[in-house]
Image (tube, coloured by chain):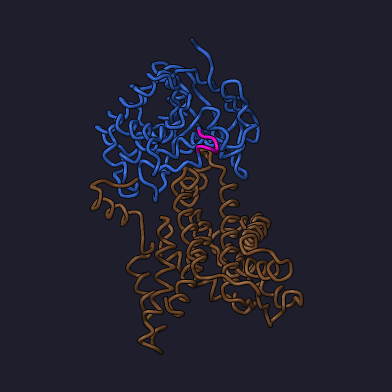
Chain colours: A blue, B brown
């Protein structure tokens, strides 16, 4: 079972005169846990933004399953089956935890459901599902509170849960482990393994190599906007280009 | 009910409706400082429809709303290209244009205004006000309401979550205009007279203050804000000449103590927690 779920094909993107992405091409296999790593400024977040539609690529295409994503505006892409989290937490500060998470379900509802009151209805399947998901990931304690007052690790987790509520087939996480302590990182790994076991493909950007090593099967490495490695984790340590990028070359 | 009480309640009702018109736009993060212009559109539409076309009261009010909504919808496209303080200025300018058009139009009575033949009682205003308040609470409790608040907080992320942010903003602005038009229609029919000078910048500033002081985070805000602003000056009448001075002090005090408005989500959560033993989410 090695179907491709996401295909990045010759994507280039410049900001002013700076080439941030240069002919980036790689594929993410269905069901895989795929990491995208690279030094700061390598273009990882820009690539995420191109995939999710915040930026249009100057050249190249992004295919998700059978769709050419570049044909769809950013808000339509979540309906196609991919959702994401953000490097700097972007939760809605004035919404409660539960409301933030329920916002993640938005794309799944038609107008008739959007007009149903959430607070007064006896049974709202969306609300029940959101509450149960929070419970499953052990953050139900906070559900009624506004997010701005919560600890960093909890907010980071809520962002992942929010992205999950769209029922994506591809979950894109931008530095999910950044700023977490060892205990929280371990818990996140367990959590992402559960997500992966439920059949969702993961594509994540992270700097924490032990975290990436223990979680991901496939790695793509970027440096100065170019893809320099694409393969499995053990191969990464022997690759000369990767070693040069991280440790510096002799010349 | 004394004439005075009835008058105060009528103004309270109109102000509450007017406050919800501005609140609905503010809930999506757009500040409308042109409230008076949209209210004037509804008031003049009612005056003309009632006097010239002989429309019955119900129909007059419905058309006052439709007219307010339609004009808001049309100007929403250029207006919503602006953001923050520029949007505040643009909406302010719209209200000035509306007043300018009325003052220069003989058909609309120019500076002398129009006497409205039909009239309504306070009770009707209160019924409409209750309906508008209930509608405000209903709207904010739906997923559309959730999307509106999300657009207020971070429109880029709301968009990635699948929210059509542009449609939400235009929809809220249009709905706001329709409700402002309704409040104008009620004003015209209750007072029996409309003149452009009444719908001035002061009115726009006050209604925005109703909403900001009341709080934009929940549907309680405009209700509390409009009631506070309408009733406190009346209660301060004993102080006579000093009442506006005292009122000014109270406003400044409120802004220092509760910069996010009288009713905030956190405050409500604490109240619900005390009553229900759980938070209402």
| Residue furthest to the bottom | B241
Q: Which is more toward the observer, A190 or B212?
A: B212
Q: Viewed as shown, does residue A177 lie left or right of A77?
A: left
Q: Is residue A178 magenta?
A: no
In this orientation, does residue B32 appear? yes
Quick check: B63 above or below A138?
below
Q: Which residue is depicted at the point 49% across and 20% down?
A: A230
- Location of residue A128 by image quarter: top left
Q: Which residue is depicted at the point 71% across and 73% down?
A: B101
Q: Viewed as shown, does residue B106 lie left or right of A24?
A: right
Q: Which residue is depicted at the point 63% across and 72% down?
A: B118
| Residue furthest to the right | B106
Please give the count of numbered marks on the rendered protein.
0
Q: Which is more toward the observer, B166 or B18?
A: B18
Give the image location of residue A137, x and y in percent. 31, 31
Give the image location of residue B236, x and y in percent. 37, 82
Q: Which residue is depicted at the point 36% across and 46% down?
A: A96
Helix, strand or loop for the magenta stretch, by majority: helix
Give the image location of residue A77, x and y in percent. 56, 32
Quick check: B202 above or below A150?
below
- Location of residue A215 by image quarter: top left
Give the image location of residue B76, x and y in percent. 64, 56
Magenta residues span A109-113
| Residue furthest to the top | A1
Q: Viewed as shown, does residue B216 lie left or right of A146?
A: right
In this orientation, does residue A249 appear? no
Q: Viewed as shown, does residue B46 lie left or right of B172?
A: right
């Amino acid at each position: 079972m090695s179907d491709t779920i996401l295909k990045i094909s010759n994507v280039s993107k410049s900001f002013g005169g700076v080439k941030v992405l240069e002919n980036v091409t790689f594929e993410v296999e269905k069901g895989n846990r795929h990491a995208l790593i690279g030094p700061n400024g390598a273009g990882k977040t820009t690539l995420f933004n191109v995939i999710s539609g915040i930026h249009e690529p100057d050249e190249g295409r992004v295919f998700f399953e059978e769709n050419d994503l570049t044909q769809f505006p950013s808000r339509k892409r979540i309906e196609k089956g991919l959702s994401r989290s953000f490097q700097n937490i972007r939760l809605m500060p004035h919404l409660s935890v539960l409301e933030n998470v329920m916002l993640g379900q938005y794309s799944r509802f038609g107008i008739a459901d959007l007009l149903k009151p959430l607070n007064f209805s006896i049974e709202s399947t969306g609300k029940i599902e959101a509450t149960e998901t929070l419970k499953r990931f052990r953050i139900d304690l906070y559900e009624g509170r506004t997010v701005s007052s919560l600890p960093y690790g909890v907010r980071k987790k809520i962002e992942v849960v929010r992205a999950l509520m769209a029922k994506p087939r591809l979950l894109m996480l931008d530095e999910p482990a950044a700023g977490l302590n060892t205990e929280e990182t371990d818990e996140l790994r367990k959590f992402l393994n559960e997500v992966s076991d439920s059949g969702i493909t993961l594509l994540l950007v992270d700097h924490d190599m032990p975290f990436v090593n223990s979680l991901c099967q496939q790695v793509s490495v970027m440096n100065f906007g170019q893809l320099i490695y694409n393969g499995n984790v053990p191969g990464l340590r022997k690759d000369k280009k990767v070693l040069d990028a991280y440790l510096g070359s002799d010349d | 009910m004394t004439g005075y009480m009835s008058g105060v309640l009528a103004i309270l009702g109109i102000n509450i409706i007017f406050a919800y018109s501005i609140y609905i736009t503010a809930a999506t993060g757009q500040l409308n400082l042109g409230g008076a212009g949209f209210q004037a559109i509804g008031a003049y539409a009612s005056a003309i429809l009632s006097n010239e076309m002989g429309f019955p009261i119900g129909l007059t009010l419905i058309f006052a709303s439709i007219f307010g909504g339609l004009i808001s919808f049309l100007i929403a496209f250029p207006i919503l290209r602006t953001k923050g303080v520029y949007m505040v200025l643009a909406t302010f300018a719209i209200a000035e244009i509306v007043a300018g058009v009325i003052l220069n139009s003989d058909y609309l009575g120019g500076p002398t205004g129009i006497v409205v033949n039909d009239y309504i009682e306070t009770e009707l205003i209160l019924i409409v006000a209750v309906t508008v308040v209930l509608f405000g609470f209903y709207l904010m409790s739906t997923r559309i309401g959730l999307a509106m608040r999300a657009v207020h907080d971070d429109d880029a992320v709301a968009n990635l979550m699948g929210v059509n942010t542009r449609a939400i903003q235009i929809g809220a602005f249009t709905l706001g205009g329709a409700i402002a038009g309704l409040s104008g229609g009620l004003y015209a029919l209750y007072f029996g007279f409309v003149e452009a000078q009444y719908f001035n910048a002061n009115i726009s500033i006050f209604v925005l203050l109703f909403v900001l002081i009341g709080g934009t985070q929940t549907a309680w805000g405009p209700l509390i804000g409009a009631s506070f602003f309408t009733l406190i000056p009346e209660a301060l009448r004993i102080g006579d000449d000093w009442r506006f001075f005292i009122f000014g002090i109270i406003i400044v005090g409120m802004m220092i103590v509760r910069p996010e408005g009288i009713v905030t989500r956190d405050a409500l959560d604490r109240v619900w927690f005390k009553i229900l033993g759980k938070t209402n989410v």
